[in-house]
Amino acid sequence: MARRREQVLDAAIQVLGGEGARRLTYQAVDAAAGVPTGTTSNYFRNRAALIDGLVDHLQALERRDWEAFAAEVAPADIGELADAVSRFLRYATGPEQARTAARFALYLESTARPELRPALTRGREGVVDWGADWLERFGSPIPRRHCEILFDYMDGVVFHQLAFPVPDFDPGPGIRELLGRLLDRATAGRDR
């Protein structure tokens, strides 16, 4: 039963991220999931419940991805960190494009439903914690703030790639420049 619910939520992410919020209907999700008509409504009694379930499911998937990413990445310097972040951005805008687009759609949904913000914020805060640890290792005196700047930049790059796709998307140069400037300034500021 839990597997069927996940199947429905995975399909809802594909519908939301691939077709937009207007297409997020019980019928569209049932069809995308390949389940009998009415299955989605059995798990989620209304659209608000479906959106709530999507937020929780998306957060769990992204937490899983970030944990795997953090476990396999051990950057030795800023260049390696920039390369790792660039790989992740290509993953988020390539194989996981629908999930990433769904996340942005949920951000927009939170403008009408502010009660979604705490869950969306918790997901981001967990990722900022991991990123801040890395930036602290590379000399940032304000790693949390620097990580927030980095993630804001990453969100902008991802949003731009989703909206205006570039065939040979390479976020590396911008990520390297941003990290270099943040961390060079951090190091220079400590020397004074």
Image (cartoon, helix red, strand yellow):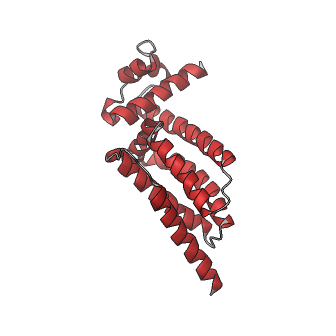
The answer to whether residue 175 is above or below residue 29 is: below
Task: Work out whether residue 34 can be spotted.
Answer: yes
| Residue nearest the viewer, comparing 182 with 81 | 81
Residue at figure coordinates x 54%, y 35% from the top left? 57
The answer to whether residue 137 is above or below residue 190 is: above
Please state the horizontal and vertical placement of residue 15, each as a whole percent of the image. 39, 30
| Residue nearest the viewer, comparing 118 with 107 | 107
The answer to whether residue 176 is above or below residue 24 is: below
Residue at figure coordinates x 68%, y 59% from the top left? 76
Question: Relative to residue 111, is residue 178 drawn left or right?
Answer: right
The answer to whether residue 168 is above or below residue 3 is: below
| Residue nearest the viewer, comparing 36 with 91 | 91
Residue, far bottom: 192
- Locate the C terminus by quadrant: bottom right
Please state the horizontal and vertical placement of residue 40, each as a whole percent of the image. 45, 21
| Residue nearest the viewer, comparing 132 with 54 | 132
Residue, far front: 168
Residue at figure coordinates x 64%, y 55% from the top left? 130
Please state the horizontal and vertical placement of residue 165, each as a whole percent of the image. 34, 45
Please state the horizontal and vertical placement of residue 7, each as a whole percent of the image. 52, 23
Question: Relative to residue 13, is residue 144 drawn left or right?
Answer: right
Task: Work out whether residue 44 can be spotted.
Answer: no
